[in-house]
Image (spheres, rainbow, N blue to C red):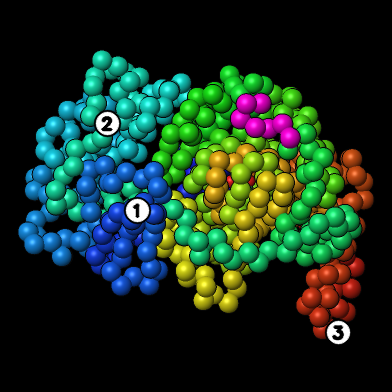
């Protein structure tokens, strides 16, 4: 798994750079619709209208996209007039500079002009301040700015509705608000082309899905999980309300996380993603069991030195995991216990649109948020020859994510899930290969000893399962020959070598 640190997904495998695609220069207006709440209308946009969540406020400071400036009668952008010489800076750079200020200075600067007020109220600045200063010990109070102020200056009275500023045009700030308040469009959820299976045997699963490395959605295999009955909000609060779980870069009590996730409306909600939940709350580990398809778990030969492999995942609608490939060439399963998740998966040889991995695979550049990817890139996939595999995975369903597949996930409602990454005989050679890459110290994840993991794992496999590696190497070589349809000459020369050229 790869994620930015702030989202804390399964690994630090890939550092993430984020970018915003420019909002097209066309007029966008926000109108009230009594049935659907507010709607964003794009002038001539091919995507039609976007609907805002019914709970969405109008932009807290009246910020409009830059394209609207070309339709305004005054042609004044108060963004610029209120910034003085700093108007030459891009919004991103300005926000980056403001990110160096502490809360008090940010508050003072916001009184300089309306423009500074808008920039200094940018919620992600206050979110960073809260997370840096309070770690996980904050009580979310409607907005990040309020949360910071109530933590440090509870005597301050904040005008929480925000001041509206006329004629302020900024794509960056508008997009940030838009992405926090957009409803998923029905057409983003329509395509459901994953293969679904119920009650198949383990052999069928291996030969039809795991061996050929294809995703599948498995129905009915969680029916016996106590978690399916038990894991409602009340139960979780009762058994672990005061336990601290990993949430982005901090550890938060579950009770405090729920207080946050119940109120939050932001572009990239904090996600609870904890690899130690079984140790922290043994009862949670007892409430589920690994579906039989995934029983082979070769990393277990490493005992306590195995990399992180299982996570509890809790998040509100809109939270999720942006595009990544799972760590260490492992495959994974993800079981939804409450809520539902939209999945988009691309095979290993297809990099999703809008996603730019670095050549060594250590970094990924991708849109700032999942919703931004849907707004700006989802449509591109319609014309692709290799269209993604997609589905909505509902409570009681499990998705198998084969090694190397890119995937993006967004929660459509408040969700609780368990996911595990695993090594079986089907991906053992790939995992060993991955762990041996020259840049293993940056690529390998979920463990402290990244550089030596390869040797430790290989030795442990040879001790626990003697002969397994040789068998797999032989099988892989036979398959390689069949696939390449090696010429007679190649066969002869290879056979003269008398051995395979693999080395791990
Ligand atoms: O957000 C989720 O449930 C998906 C997590 C995920 O992509 C993963 O565990 O690899």
For the point 42% across and 61% down, the residue is 375
Earlier along the polypeptide chain: callout 2 or callout 1? 1
Mark 2 touching mark 3, by CB under 8 A?
Answer: no
- In the picture, residue 465 is in which quadrant? top right
The residue to which callout 2 is attached is 160
Asked whether residue 311 appears in the rendered view, the answer is yes
For the point 20% across and 61% down, the residue is 68
Q: Is residue 186 left or right of residue 392?
A: left
Magenta part of the protein: which range?
Answer: 229-235
Asked whether residue 331 appears in the rendered view, the answer is no
Q: Is mark 3 within 8 Å of ligand 1?
A: no
Q: Is residue 101 left or right of residue 202?
A: left
Please, is residue 45 above or below residue 85 in the view?
Answer: below
Please, is residue 337 above or below residue 73 in the view?
Answer: above
Mark 2: which secondary structure?
loop
For the point 22% across and 43% down, the residue is 61
The residue to which callout 3 is attached is 488
Mark 1: which secondary structure?
loop
Please, is residue 186 above or below residue 53 in the view?
Answer: below
In space, the residues marked 2 and 1 are separated at their CA atoms by 25 Å
In terms of depth relative to the viewer, which is nearer, 472 or 295? 295
In terms of depth relative to the viewer, which is nearer, 83 or 410? 410
Q: Which residue ends up furthest to the top in the rendered image?
A: 155
The residue to which callout 1 is attached is 34
Residue 463 placement (x, y as % from top left)? 89, 40
In space, the residues marked 2 and 3 are separated at their CA atoms by 77 Å
Q: Is residue 61 left or right of residue 333?
A: left
Q: What is the crowding at mark 2: few (fewer than 14 residues within 10 Å), some, or many (at least 20)? A: few
């Amino acid at each position: 798994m790869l994620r930015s640190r702030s989202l804390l997904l399964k690994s630090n495998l890939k550092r993430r750079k984020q970018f915003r695609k420019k909002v097209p220069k066309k007029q966008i207006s926000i109108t009230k619709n009594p049935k659907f709440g507010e709607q964003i209308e794009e002038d001539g946009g091919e995507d039609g209208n976007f609907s805002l969540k019914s709970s969405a406020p109008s932009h807290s400071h009246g910020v409009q996209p830059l394209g609207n400036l070309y339709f305004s009668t005054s042609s004044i952008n108060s963004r610029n007039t209120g910034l003085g010489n700093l108007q030459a800076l891009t919004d991103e750079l300005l926000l980056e500079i403001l990110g160096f200020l502490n809360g008090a200075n940010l508050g003072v600067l916001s009184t300089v002009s309306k423009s500074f007020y808008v920039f200094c109220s940018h919620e992600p600045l206050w979110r960073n301040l809260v997370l840096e200063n309070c770690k996980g010990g904050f009580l979310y109070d409607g907005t990040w700015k309020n949360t910071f102020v109530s933590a440090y200056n509870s005597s301050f009275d904040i005008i929480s509705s925000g001041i509206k500023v006329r004629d302020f045009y900024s794509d960056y700030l508008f997009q940030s608000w838009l992405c926090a308040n957009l409803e998923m469009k029905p057409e983003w959820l329509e395509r459901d082309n994953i293969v679904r299976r119920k009650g198949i045997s383990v052999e069928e699963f291996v030969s039809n899905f795991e061996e050929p490395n294809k995703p599948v959605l498995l129905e009915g295999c969680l029916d016996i999980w106590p978690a399916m009955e038990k894991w409602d909000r009340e139960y979780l609060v009762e058994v672990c309300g005061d336990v601290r779980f990993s949430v982005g870069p901090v550890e938060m009590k579950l009770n405090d996380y729920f207080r946050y996730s119940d109120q939050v409306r932001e572009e990239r909600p904090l996600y609870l993603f904890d690899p130690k939940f079984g140790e922290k709350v043994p009862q949670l580990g007892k409430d589920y069991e690994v579906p039989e398809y995934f029983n082979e778990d070769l990393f277990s030969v490493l005992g306590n030195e195995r990399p992180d492999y299982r996570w509890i995942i809790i998040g509100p609608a809109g939270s999720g995991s942006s595009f990544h490939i799972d760590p260490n060439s492992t495959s994974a399963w993800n079981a939804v216990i409450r809520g539902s998740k939209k999945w988009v998966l691309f095979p290993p040889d297809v990099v999703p649109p809008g996603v730019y991995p670095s050549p060594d695979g250590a970094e990924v550049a991708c849109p700032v948020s999942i919703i931004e990817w849907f707004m700006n890139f989802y449509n591109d996939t319609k014309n692709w020859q290799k269209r993604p595999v997609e589905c909505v995975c509902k409570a009681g369903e499990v998705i198998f994510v084969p090694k190397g597949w890119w995937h993006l996930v967004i929660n459509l409602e408040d969700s609780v899930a368990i996911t595990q990454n695993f090594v079986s005989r089907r991906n053992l050679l790939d995992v060993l290969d991955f762990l041996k890459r020259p840049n293993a110290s940056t690529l390998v994840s979920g463990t402290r000893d990244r550089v030596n993991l390869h040797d430790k794992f290989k030795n442990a496999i040879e001790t626990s399962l003697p002969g397994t590696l040789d068998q797999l190497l032989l099988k892989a070589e036979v398959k390689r020959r069949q696939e390449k349809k090696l010429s007679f000459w190649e066969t002869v020369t290879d056979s003269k070598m008398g051995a395979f050229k693999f080395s791990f």
